[in-house]
Image: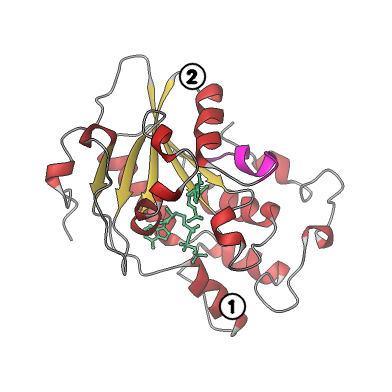
């Protein structure tokens, strides 16, 4: 497939690189679990927009998913995200959303990251489904000035042009990955393979903690959990 932008008319306002400032992609998600659709989207946007780094930000309490199903423990989702991104020197993971109490709002994510990374310009990456819902997010009208938004194609979802000025966003085509976390959870529950849909380490993590079967573990079942993370996990932390 072509790696050229799918929507060239929306592709002309990308903020240029500013000397002395880094370009930081932000990939927010519930990541229950993280899969190759997330990773390919981040990798492609990083290449097309010349990003120095993409920080993956697992949600704490994703309020728009909470009424639909029980979301896995944040520490499981965080650790799977660390495992999935560890081999890419430009990928990091942030705990800002899982360490903040209450529902996760992107307005807080972006304000926290801007405070932590004052020398960075932020590029918030979303798939078509999330991008189309953005007007329902908290303080959605204020988000556009905190980051530049990049909406990417996703099989099964139409990528719509948001109702803001073209200087605030780009829409782009990424390699089509017809993968969802929902599908992976359902496959796991039905003992169907999830190899090659998620990184190998994530397959092994799902199996180790039996995450998506009826008897899924909670945080309290994890070993060495007195300090909030499984033994050895602190060494894996990065990106903050
Ligand atoms: N296959 C994919 N291609 C492109 N973008 C994706 C893909 N899967 C998820 N995304 C985007 O990644 C972000 C985080 O998605 P999320 O963690 O909710 O995954 P999901 O697969 O949509 O999960 P679920 O099936 O549980 O709703 C969102 O912006 C979403 O649009
Ligand atoms: O700010 C909000 O109100 C809001 C509502 C829904 C989703 N988001 C963000 O959108 C990103 C993708 O979310 P999700 O639920 O599709 O995994 C993630 O960073 C969420 O925090 C943000």
What element does badge 2 sit on? loop
According to the image, label 2 marks what residue? 118
Q: Is residue 44 above or below residue 207?
A: above
Residue 115 in percent (x, y) is at 55, 22
What element does badge 1 sit on? helix
Whether residue 100 appears in magenta in the rendering, the answer is: yes
Q: Is residue 145 above or below residue 211?
A: above
Q: In the image, what residue occupies the spot 19% across and 32% down? A: 13
Label 1 crowding class (10 Å Cα cut-off): few <14, some 14-19, many 20+? Answer: some
Q: Which segment is the magenta one?
A: 92-102
Label 2 crowding class (10 Å Cα cut-off): few <14, some 14-19, many 20+? Answer: few
Viewer-proximal residue among 33 and 207? 33
Q: Quadrant of the N terminus?
A: bottom left
Label at residue 4 = none
Viewer-proximal residue among 42 and 232? 42
Q: In the image, what residue occupies the spot 25% across and 42% down? A: 170
Label at residue 188 = 1
Residue 34 in percent (x, y) is at 52, 58
Place residue 196 in its image quadrant: bottom left
* Disc nearest the viewer among 2 and 1: 2
Q: Is residue 48 above or below residue 38?
A: above
């Amino acid at each position: 497939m072509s790696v050229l932008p799918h929507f060239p008319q929306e592709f002309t306002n990308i903020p240029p690189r500013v000397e002395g400032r880094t370009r930081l992609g932000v990939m927010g998600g519930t990541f229950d679990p993280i899969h190759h659709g997330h990773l390919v989207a981040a990798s492609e946007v990083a290449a097309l927009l010349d990003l120095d780094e993409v920080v993956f930000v697992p949600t704490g309490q994703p309020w728009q998913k909470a009424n639909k199903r029980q979301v896995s423990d944040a520490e499981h989702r965080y650790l799977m995200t660390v495992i999935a991104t560890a081999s890419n020197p430009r990928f990091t993971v942030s705990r800002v959303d899982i360490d903040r109490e209450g529902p996760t709002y992107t307005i807080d994510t972006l304000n926290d990251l801007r405070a932590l990374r004052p020398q960075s310009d932020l590029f918030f990456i979303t798939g078509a489904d999330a991008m189309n819902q953005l007007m329902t997010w908290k303080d959605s009208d204020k988000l556009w000035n905190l980051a530049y938004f990049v909406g990417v194609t996703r099989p099964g979802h139409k990528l719509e042009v948001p109702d803001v000025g073209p200087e605030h966003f780009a829409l782009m085509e990424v390699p089509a990955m017809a993968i969802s976390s929902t599908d992976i959870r359902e496959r796991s529950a039905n003992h169907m393979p999830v190899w090659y849909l998620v990184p190998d380490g994530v397959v092994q993590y799902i199996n180790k903690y039996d995450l998506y079967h009826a008897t899924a573990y909670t945080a309290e079942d994890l070993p060495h959990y007195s300090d909030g993370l499984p033994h050895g996990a602190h060494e894996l932390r990065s990106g903050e």
